[in-house]
Amino acid sequence: MITTLGETGLTVTRIGLGLAALGRPAYINLGHADDLAGHTDVLSMEQRAHAVLDAAYAGGVRYFDAARSYGKAEAFLGSWLVRRGLGPNDVTVGSKWGYTYTADWRIAADVHEVKDLGAENFRRQLTETREVLGDHVRLYQIHSATLDSGVLDDREVLDELAALRAGGVRIGFTTTGPHQGETIERALAVGGFDSVQSTWNLLERSATGALRAAHEAGLGVIIKEALANGRLTDRGDVSELHAAARDAETTPDALALAAVLAQPWVDVVLSGATTVWELQSNLSGVGRGVDVSRFDSAIEDPDTYWAKRGKLPWN
């Protein structure tokens, strides 16, 4: 399960834990409200996060992925690291800058996060991240870089990232939307990046070629939203996946994650589990064989996929 993230030298595991759904009371995963069962106060959320982190660590997970916009995810991760007595060399922690959490712990907020990929926001959020996680942060990523955001052509931002990289922190970027491939290609042309984190799953595979190219260029490849925000779980309606899971006597999520891990250019796939049971089910996908072509009929046009994602409600 242990591997290296591209040519970064960072030790990671084939499955990592993403904290988007653990750090704030509202998220867009199907059934998120059911998982929380009304226990959305800060203390309950921190206890839940610690329980899932404990289960992940016990299951061999050593890569943990947070962001400034994930509510209190960085704080929950930081308090867990202290409780467990884990140092920067015991686990690999990645975080992201670019979005500010604005929901103020409200589930029914009109706006949950605001995007700003400018240099001033980078400096502010890097300081905030370091105040919480200190030297544990080994990978710092642009959150949802896109071509139209202009961040990959912002000289001031690129210089700030280069300075951070010169200090020993690996630099990555994440992508979103129907044009992920073009964003990855632009980032490779710009240079200065050590990793890419993108959406790839049985429904949305449009970034395959660009991710393969990133892998061949030495970048670490991290896959997020491998379960399509719950659509590729037993809560979803992808009949091909449900039938295959029944045949294999396993869960849809385990097969969906195994399909990602079957791609030779993938280093890490993130679990977005909110409960210990979900995490354990996700982990059962490691080492499982899967015929990915069986699900080709489920592939969606990127514009269709991202339009559906955009309509998913928070909780």
Image (cartoon, grey):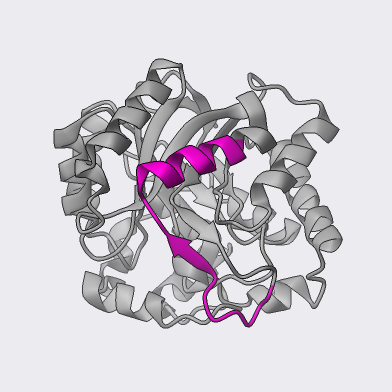
Would you say 230 lies left or right of 192 here? right
For residue 84, say whether it is visible.
yes
Would you say 132 lies left or right of 51 here? left
Say above or below: 49 vs 229. above
Name which residue lies at 39% across and 50% down: 260
Name which residue lies at 82% across and 67% down: 41
- Quarter that holds the N terminus: top right
Tell me the quarter of the picture where residue 228 sits: bottom left
Q: Position of residue 55 (x, y in %)?
A: 75, 45
> Is residue 108 on the magenta stretch?
yes
The residue lying furthest to the front in this view is: 120
For residue 91, say whether it is visible.
no
**Which of 166/253 is in front?**
166
Would you say 261 lies left or right of 184 here? right
Tell me the quarter of the picture where residue 56 sits: top right
Write down the region rendered in magenta. Answer: 106-129
Q: Position of residue 3 (x, y in %)?
A: 48, 26
Q: Position of residue 254 (x, y in %)?
A: 54, 57
- Quarter that holds the C terminus: bottom right
Say above or below: 310 vs 171. below
Total labels: the figure holds: 0
> Is residue 113 on the magenta stretch?
yes
Tell me the quarter of the picture where residue 298 sits: bottom left
Name which residue lies at 26% across and 74% down: 300
Name which residue lies at 37% across and 41% down: 119
